């Protein structure tokens, strides 16, 4: 995939998703303030935990919007892939922040479970119910854009998990109002913390895999090697590397050994077509190797030596 095609794809993704992100961001932000103030006034950990989760949604939506916008910037001489990896860094930061927040929720739940504080139940129940409606609205808004990248998918999953958190907060309010079970509030807070960790685990793992340049999960390097070696002109494949640049942008580099140097140009094109159509790999670097390719009698070193002497690169 060339850089212009990548930028065009991200531009289309940004245009189709930016207004959804903006609408979801502002609805979540306004109610985050409402739920945070309500949590302090009612002294409900479940409500505060849900407000914390909603804050993570606000951060995820805001950072997703900024990261999506920055990926539209063209590559530079120093950042040859542009800013595509920014969305991966944002996703990882978002996931780690969720874990820190979950740790605080667990700490508060542990402190409150033995001596549950009094809670102003009716306002808590009203706020939690409104929070559930706001989260469901955000889920509906982002549903069409959930497959447009790791950040948009993470934002959608955040809102979906937060909807479950709001259900837990509503359940806690109902249990206290009807049964007087004040212990249910810290338990509901802890349950929300567990849901946050479960929901963010896949996000953190996927972002870490991309930063570690692991092969995409849907592409098997052994299968790619076998497909390349099926070509009648290919003798051996080695030094195969497949990695993810950003969401939906994959790259490959490989050394291919052949017998006859006469078929080099056509072979490169054929292998690129194979990788593109069979595995969806479009950003490929294929090094063809074979008998005589590096023979000084065939490839004189005079020009290369001149280039080396004129190169001021320092190790």
Image (cartoon, helix red, strand yellow):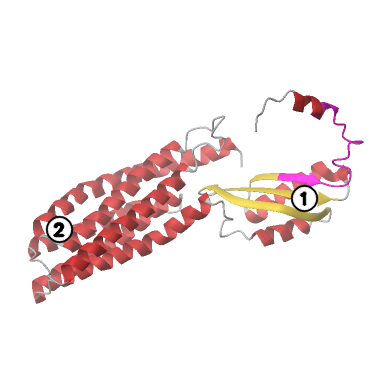
Name which of mark 1 and mark 2 comes first in the sequence: 2
Any part of residue 232 in sight: yes
Q: Position of residue 10 (x, y in %)?
A: 49, 41
Identify the residue position indicated by label 2 in the image.
Answer: 127
Q: Is the residue 127 above or below the residue 115 in the image?
A: above
Instruction: Specify start and end residues of the magenta stretch as a single range.
Output: 286-304
Q: Quadrant of residue 200?
A: bottom left
> Residue placed farthest to the bottom in the image?
179
Describe residue 1's horizontal placement relative to residue 263 as left or right. left
Q: Nearer the viewer, residue 45 or 114?
A: 114
| Helix, strand or loop under label 2 | helix
Q: Label 1: few (<14), some or many (≥20) within 10 Å? A: many
Q: Nearer the viewer, residue 77 or 104?
A: 104
Residue located at (14% from left, 73% from top)? 175
Q: Position of residue 253 (x, y in %)?
A: 67, 47
Describe residue 78's horizontal placement relative to residue 184 as left or right. right
| Residue 85 lies in the magenta stretch | no
Q: Position of residue 125 (x, y in %)?
A: 13, 63
| The N terminus, quarter of image | top right
Q: Label 2: few (<14), some or many (≥20) within 10 Å? A: many
Identify the residue position indicated by label 1 in the image.
Answer: 256
Describe residue 212's horizontal placement relative to residue 191 as left or right. right
Q: Main secondary structure of the magenta part?
A: loop
């Amino acid at each position: 995939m060339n850089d212009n095609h990548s930028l065009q794809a991200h531009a289309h993704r940004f245009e189709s998703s930016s207004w959804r992100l903006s609408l979801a961001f502002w609805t979540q932000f306004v109610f985050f303030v409402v739920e945070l103030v309500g949590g302090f006034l009612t002294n409900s950990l479940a409500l505060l935990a849900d407000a914390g989760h909603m804050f993570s949604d606000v951060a995820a939506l805001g950072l997703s919007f900024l990261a999506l916008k920055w990926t539209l910037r063209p590559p530079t001489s120093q950042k040859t892939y542009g800013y595509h990896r920014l969305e991966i860094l944002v996703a990882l930061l978002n996931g780690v922040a969720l874990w820190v927040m979950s740790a605080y929720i667990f700490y508060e739940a542990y402190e409150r479970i033995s001596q549950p504080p009094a809670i102003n139940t009716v306002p808590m129940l009203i706020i939690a119910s409104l929070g559930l409606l706001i989260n469901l609205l955000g889920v509906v808004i982002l549903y069409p854009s959930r497959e447009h990248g790791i950040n948009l998918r993470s934002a959608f999953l955040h809102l979906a998990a937060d909807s479950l958190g709001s259900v837990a907060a509503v359940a806690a309010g109902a249990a206290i109002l009807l049964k007087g079970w004040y212990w249910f509030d810290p338990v509901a807070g802890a349950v929300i913390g567990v849901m946050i960790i479960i929901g963010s685990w896949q996000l953190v793992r996927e972002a870490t895999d991309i930063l570690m340049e692991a092969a995409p999960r849907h592409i098997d390097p052994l299968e790619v090697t076998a497909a390349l070696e099926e070509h009648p002109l290919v003798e051996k494949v080695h030094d195969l590397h497949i990695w993810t640049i950003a969401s939906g942008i994959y790259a490959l580099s490989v050394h291919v050994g052949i017998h006859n140097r006469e078929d080099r140009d056509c072979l490169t094109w054929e292998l690129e077509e194979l990788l593109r159509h069979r595995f969806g790999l479009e950003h490929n670097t294929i090094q063809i190797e074979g008998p005589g390719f590096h023979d000084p009698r065939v490839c004189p070193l005079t020009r290369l030596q001149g280039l080396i002497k004129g190169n001021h690169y320092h190790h």
